Amino acid sequence: MPQRAPTVDPGRVPDSELEDRFGRRFAYLRLSITDVCNFRCEYCLPDGYQGKPTGFLNRDEIQRLVSAFAELGIRKLRITGGEPLVRKDALAILADAAATPGIEKLALTTNAFNLAAQAEALRDAGLSAVNISLDSLDRQGFERITGDKRHEKVLAGVDAAIAAGIPSVKINTVLLGGLNDQEIPDFMEYVRERPVAVRFIELMQTADNGDYFRRRHVSGQTVADRLQAAGWSPMQRGETDGPAVEYSHPDYAGRIGLIAPYAPGFCDGCNRLRVTARGGLRLCLFGNGTHDLRPLLQDEADKAALKRSICQTLVGKEVSHHLHEGDFGDTPHLASTGG
């Protein structure tokens, strides 16, 4: 449910190191370790990855970054991409992060192209949550949306994550008019016996998907209305939870969630920061510019300066995105910043 809007006070002196001038505190970091993705989702990378797969933070730089953020109060870390598991050292990066003092919850977002083979190793590395991108339960629908034929492998990855005992297993489904919005009842049935959460994500406009957005955007309110009409009830949001409003039902083992960035009050409870795969601190997914932290990641002796730089940059965080005004910042596509 929308939370109380933060008080706008540009002159506010934060009470804690990771608090912005509107009184919002940040305990959740989303860290991209690559912008490479091996799927061709038509809402994100319809022509496939076109960047240069070089220059990403190395394992030592990542660990210095994670340690500094943990000392500033980050308790939940999500490793994202692109597709993070295309990195050969992804498992080692996750194990390093899980062993970092202060990190209480380690999460991963993946398209699950190889999750079935890696689920137990990821659990053993300390992974406590996995979010799996799955935009259709139908094989043909999946292939149409993702440009990939590994539908069965993705479904097997969901079941493998559950079987491995990873504590939190969630599915991310981008809601697309005329492509998968008719599958909402199917996803409800999918969680009847499975202890997973399916979260429908409202399609967001970026720099390169304007025409597609206008054709396929469906308001998240349509999902909320259907859930409540079917007897689902919204759940309380935790301090380190992401932006989803999750719904439960006594007859279902799983949950249904909704991420609706165009809903009123969406930014009020913002609790997360983002760092790109090359070390750029982004204060908002749909903001402009990044603050380069990489020069301060070369030596452990720079940690104090790194933490000061993070805190000073946070002062510039705005109260809200400007998606309602058609301003999506300088985000070209979601794979570029980890979503």
Image: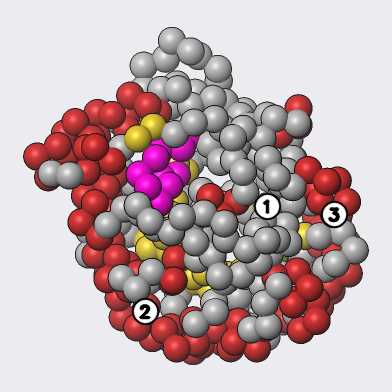
| Residue range of the region highlighted in magenta in the rendering | 274-283
- In front here: 335 or 2? 335
Q: Nearer the viewer, mark 3 or mark 1?
A: 3
The residue at which mark 2 appears reads as: 123
Q: Position of residue 147 (x, y in %)?
A: 71, 72
Q: Amino acid at mark 3?
A: Arg
Q: Please give the name of the residue rendered at 55% of the width and 84% of the height, measured from the top-left corner.
A: 157
Secondary structure of residue under mark 3: helix
Q: Position of residue 314 (x, y in %)?
A: 40, 28
Secondary structure of residue under mark 2: helix
* Res. 75 visible in picture: no
Q: Please give the name of the residue rendered at 44% of the width and 71% of the height, measured from the top-left corner.
A: 86
Q: Earlier in the sequence, mark 1 or mark 2?
A: 2
Q: Is residue 100 magenta?
A: no
Q: Earlier in the sequence, mark 3 or mark 1?
A: 3
Q: Please give the name of the residue rendered at 41% of the width and 22% of the height, measured from the top-left corner.
A: 315
Alpha-carbon neighbours of circle 2 within 10 Å: few (<14), some, or many (≥20)? some
Alpha-carbon neighbours of circle 3 within 10 Å: few (<14), some, or many (≥20)? some
Residues marked 3 and 1 touching at CB (< 8 Å): no
Is 158 displayed left or right of 302 in the figure? right
* Res. 148 visible in picture: yes
Q: Is residue 279 magenta?
A: yes
Q: Position of residue 286 (x, y in %)?
A: 60, 37
How far apart are the two marked residues, 3 and 1, measured between alpha carbons? Answer: 16 Å
Numbered label attached to residue 259: 1
Q: Nearer the viewer, mark 2 or mark 3?
A: 3
